[in-house]
Amino acid sequence: MKEELFVSGRAIPNIDPYLNIWHWSIPVYLFLGGLAAGLLFFAGLYSILGKEKEMPTTVKWATFLAPAALVIGLLCLFIDLKHKLYFWQLYTTIRLQSPMSWGAWVLMLITPLSFLWAGSYVRELKPSWKWTFPLLNKVEVWVAAHRKGLAWAMVILSVILGIYTGILLSAFNARPLWNTSLLGPLFLVSGLSSGVATILWMSKNHAERVLLSKIDLILIGIELFLIIHLFMGFLASNAVQVEAAQLFLGGEFTVFFWVFVVILGLVFPAILEILELRGIKIPVVIPALMVLIGGLIFRFIMVEAGQITRYLY
Amino acid sequence: MATKEIQDRSRTYLNPYAAGIWLGLVLLMTFYITGRGLGASGSIKTAVASTVNTIAPKHAQQSHYLSQFITADENPMNNWLTFEVIGVLAGALISGALAGRLKLKVEHSPNITSQRRLVFATLGGLAFGIGSQFGRGCTSGAALSGMASLAAGGFIAMLSIFGAAYAFAYFFRKNWI
Amino acid sequence: MRYGMAIDTRKCVGCSDCVVACQTENNVPIGYCRDWVVEVMAGTYPELEIEIRSERCNHCENSPCVRCCPTGASHLEQGGIVTVTHSECIGCGACIQSCPYDARYSHPDGYVDKCTFCLHRIQQGQGPACVAVCPTKCMYFGDLDDPNSEVSIALENRKFKVLAPEAGTRPQIYYLI
């Protein structure tokens, strides 16, 4: 037998018996960040490809959600800080070795960009729109003139945003469940899939919906592939990671992960989308909502389970 | 072209005897895979117990009936019936979509309004809910799975459910014909 | 100049004086501690072995907490001591997530805190409080780069180990076994 005890009686709040210093606001932010990354990536991509007319919701209308998602996400991050008055310190330095620092700066760049992009389409939605400040008219003209450059910036920044939400967690090697380089791509693909699901839900154009369904199916396929390889990686790794994987293969998170994230969040919506592509009518809200809820629950589970795993004790 | 075929298909139903045999085979598979039969009312019961426990925990602890299902360690919703019901909903969604019958509507006899249908459905559901807790199960759990395992209670439940329906059908015939 | 500690697990009796001294010296809030004592019992009765360790922040050479801090609040001071500048810390908790030894905690005032090797005492030529009060004198503190410091001498002739070497952090607390 081998027994380890804290003889001095350690019971630090949020650290013992299991680390739980990050609560609901971090998974909500990770979800909203991924969603915004997905929305902006496809908007930028289809704008560069010149498909503004065929994919109006993707390039224009869905991006109205991105600034809202980013602002709410930033608020969630702010709520999570424990030394809130000093939050501005984040913007006094760029620390290349800290993914949290990259994230702070990427958000600082992509949020105004998303406002600019969505703002430039307001007039199309409501022709009688008048900006409060005359400067904004000049900004609108500038954005329309530089749309291609802004689209490229959006594509690059949204990929960084999507991947950084995963790299943020995988940089914490001390949590064996997160100590895998697959988390970056996994969170990116999950974010892109959430974005596509939202656009699919909003779109009224049949051809656009068909293309987006196909893209969503590919993304779900990639996500399932990555999840399987995630677990294969854990089981082939060292003892702490095998133990971490056991949380999902018989441990307390087994049912919630495989039923709510994989089956109801990925496989079942994929089946519904395949049926829809075959001509069988299914209300689009059902697969879209399931993908979104699956993505949210996935992040909740990863953050909570990751904090439970540890190297020692 | 696919949609037109489906529109014509929505009026075709599976032969009820064939459907019964399929259901029996599903029940057999369920016994083989999970070691237990099917169920339904139990999931509603745990949902009620969880809800009452969240809103009025003291009442839930004091109630002799509800307190049985509320334990400190396990969330009452974390049981196989909840997941079975999720599966039923998912499967019904696919089956309804394939049959072209996926539409939000109230099915009722042309002689009555949908409001009347809903009111009577609620009353009937209430009666069935109360009855199912007396009998520790409804048609799928007590009657079907019970009969499948040759439990005397299963047979009695089945006979009572159908007998009572038969006896009272005369008084509610105006809702249907 | 590389500050480190050597702790003799064969002399430690688990009295936890080091824990109390640290809490007193550094005004650690009630319920929190910067160091703690772990007892490991291994084997099958009657062949049992016991190891008692006083653990704290290991002031790692390759510290993940310094790397992942987004504001630079978590930094290396003179001699490789890892400290947190309270006015630069935003309380994001990244360093807490990145420490394999769970040595950091979130202070109720908002910033993140941990063992500082009593930097304020070192700057006055004294050693850390825990080393000073240890009744069995099992803890040695000093400059690992100086071959004549008590910690270097302690490491010369004894077998030692570090905690979780596989995490790659190169901790500077050596347990003499």
Image (cartoon, coloured by chain):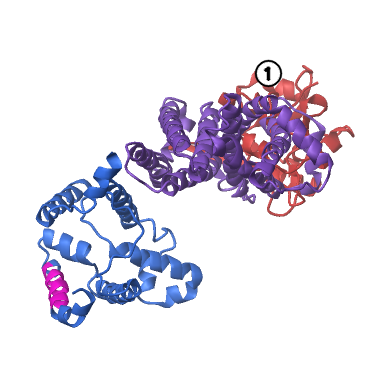
Chain colours: A purple, B blue, C red
Residue B41 among magenta residues: no
Residue C164, visible in the rendered structure: no
Q: Nearer the viewer, residue A283 or C35?
A: A283
Q: Residue at x 84, y 43 (%)?
A: A134
Q: Nearer the viewer, residue A118 or B138?
A: A118
**Magenta span:** B155-166
Assess disc 1: are there few (<14), some (14-19) or many (≥20) residues with their C-alpha within 10 Å of its C-alpha.
few
Looking at the rendered image, the quarter that the C terminus of chain A falls into is top right
Q: Position of residue B44 (x, y in %)?
A: 34, 65
Q: Position of residue A156 (x, y in %)?
A: 64, 25
Q: Residue at x 35, y 45 (%)?
A: A281
- Give the quadrant of residue A211: top left
Residue B158 among magenta residues: yes
Residue at which label 1 appears: C156
Q: Position of residue C119 (x, y in %)?
A: 82, 35
The type of residue carrying mark 1 is: Glu
Which residue, as the protein is rendered here, is positioned at the far right? C124
Q: Nearer the viewer, residue A28 or C26?
A: A28
Q: Residue at x 51, y 27 (%)?
A: A182
Q: Position of residue B54 (x, y in %)?
A: 49, 67
Residue B158, visible in the rendered structure: yes
Q: State left or right for residue B73 relative to residue A151.
A: left
